[in-house]
């Protein structure tokens, strides 16, 4: 969500209300800068305030996070698949 907002030219940051800001902007509601900043106690930054490579670094970080999430879920899937197959095999082989 941060990268598309960055591409719009401004970033709004609020320590307490960041999730509400993302939800507000995700719903394509036009922000009236002053009202928006007051409502969410946000600070507005222009993309010019960030370094030249900032967007590239954001994309690289996003790729790492996606890979990490994929790795974690894959590991859980393999573990649980093995575990449930083992439990199922024990249930099937159990003599009544």
Image: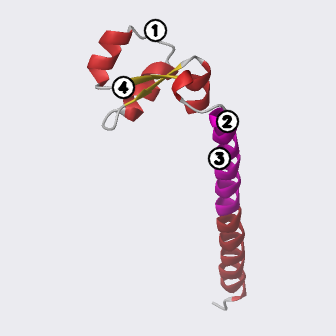
* Sequence-wise first label, 3 or 2: 2
* Residue in view at x 65 percent, y 44 percent: 62
- Mark 1 neighbour density, 10 Å: few (under 14) some (14–19) many (20 or more): few
Residue 75: image location, x then y, percent = 69, 67
User: 10 Å neighbourhood of mark 3: few (<14), some, or many (≥20)?
Assistant: few
Magenta-highlighted residues: 53-73
In the rendered image of this protein, does residue 7 appear above or below residue 52? above
35 with respect to 74 (left or right): left
Report x, y in % for residue 49.
Answer: 51, 26
Which residue is pictured at 65% across the width and 70% down the height? 80
- In this figure, which colouring scheme has been used for the structure? secondary structure
Residue position marked by numbered label 1 in the rendering = 30
- State which mark lies toward you, 3 or 2: 2
In front: 24, or 53?
Answer: 53
Q: Residue at x 61, y 25 (%)?
A: 4
Q: CA distance from mark 3 to mark 1?
A: 28 Å
Label for residue 61? Answer: 3
Q: Looking at the image, is mark 2 or mark 1 nearer the viewer?
A: 2
How far is mark 2 from mark 1, CA to CA? 28 Å
Screen quadrant of the C terminus? bottom right
Q: Secondary structure at mark 4?
A: strand
Marks 3/1 in contact by CB < 8 Å: the verdict is no
Q: Is residue 29 left or right of residue 66?
A: left
**Which numbered disc, 2 or 4, marks the residue closer to the eye?**
2
The label on residue 53 is: 2
Magenta span contains residue 68: yes
Counting the numbered discs, the total is 4
Residue 46: % across, % down: 50, 20
CA neighbours of label 2 inside 10 A, class few (<14), some (14 to 19), many (20+): few
Secondary structure beneath dot 1 equals loop
């Amino acid at each position: 969500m941060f990268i598309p907002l960055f591409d719009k030219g401004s970033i709004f940051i609020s320590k307490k209300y960041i999730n509400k800001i993302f939800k507000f902007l995700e719903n394509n509601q036009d922000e009236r800068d002053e009202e928006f900043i007051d409502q969410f106690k946000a600070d507005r930054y222009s993309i010019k305030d960030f370094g030249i490579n900032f967007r590239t670094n954001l994309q690289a970080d996003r790729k790492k996070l996606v890979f990490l999430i994929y790795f974690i879920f894959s590991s859980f899937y393999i573990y649980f698949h093995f575990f449930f197959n083992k439990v199922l095999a024990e249930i099937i082989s159990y003599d009544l």
